[in-house]
Image (cartoon, grey):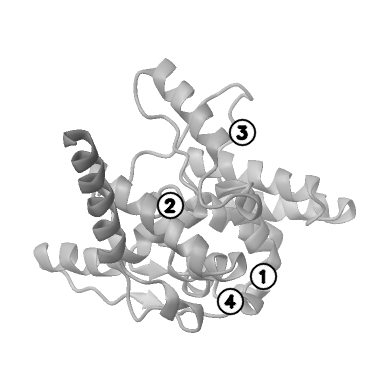
Amino acid sequence: MAFLALVGALFLGAWLAWRSLPDPTPLATRPPATTALIEQRRAEAAAAGKAFRPDYRPVSLDRISPRLVRAVVASEDASFFGHAGFDWDEIKNAAEQNWKAGRTVRGASTITQQLAKNLWLGTERSYLRKVREALLAVKLERTLPKRRILTLYLDVAEWGNGVFGAEAASRRWFGIGARDLSAAQASALAAMLPAPRKAALAPAPRWLARKARRILSLLERNGTVPAGEAPAARAELERLLGAPAPLPSDADEEPPPDPE
């Protein structure tokens, strides 16, 4: 009897936790007015006595270059269209790599999980936040189609200090709208996502340059960049990066952790 009571209490607690989380339904037709991450950055700026004017310009997916869409998916979550919120193979591989390294050197968050964090949770690190992130990812996947999840992610992702979303990022870094991004520009933007507030161009940090080159190679392999256009795209990327020569192929250089 005690066991059944415990099970019942656990189920009740899980149900109450589920019910207490935000409902993604309104996001099916309109972008959020703000996000937890934007408000966190606003509070951080206020605490430091600094002004904060976020550049946040949500747009529809047809106003974002397919090159950037494919670059972000290839870089951040290659299995995005095939999973239900979690990439279990990636989770397993990341766990094994982190165990061998004795520290966290690789994450496994999907685009859906990252969206849940950006929208509602901010960057706090705790087990409770990870549980809430997982539940919210399930809610997002059950409520919204994949294209809408991807649109929201591209609209609210942080791309520099005070810069949120692909449209604001394109104008901040290149002075053009998101629909006009070249493959090289898209590769550079996608490479920034792990540590957007540490990103720079001409010169780019070595970790960003390495990642951007890798992403452009992925775009060449999946046909986003036709073979005849690849040399020009590579040359453009090098001009944007203004970076040192590539690291050896076996080098392991990742972006530094972004301050929370």
Residue 189 position in % (x across, y down): 54, 58
Residue carrying label 4: 176
Residue carrying label 1: 65
Closer to the chain start, of discs 3 and 2, is: 2
Disc 2 residue type (three-letter):
Ala
| Residue at left offset 24%, top offset 69% | 39
* Distance Cα–Cα, label 3 vs label 1: 27 Å
Viewer-side label of 3, 2: 2
| Residue at left offset 36%, top offset 72% | 23
**Mark 1 Cα within 10 Å, few/some/many (few <14, many 20+)?**
many
Closer to the chain start, of discs 2 and 4, is: 4
* Distance Cα–Cα, label 1 vs label 4: 11 Å
Q: Which image quadrant is residue 53 in?
A: bottom left
Instruction: State which quarter of the image contains the N terminus.
Output: top left
* Distance Cα–Cα, label 4 vs label 3: 28 Å
Residue 105 seen by the camera = yes
Disc 4 residue type (three-letter):
Ile
Residue 122 position in % (x across, y down): 28, 58
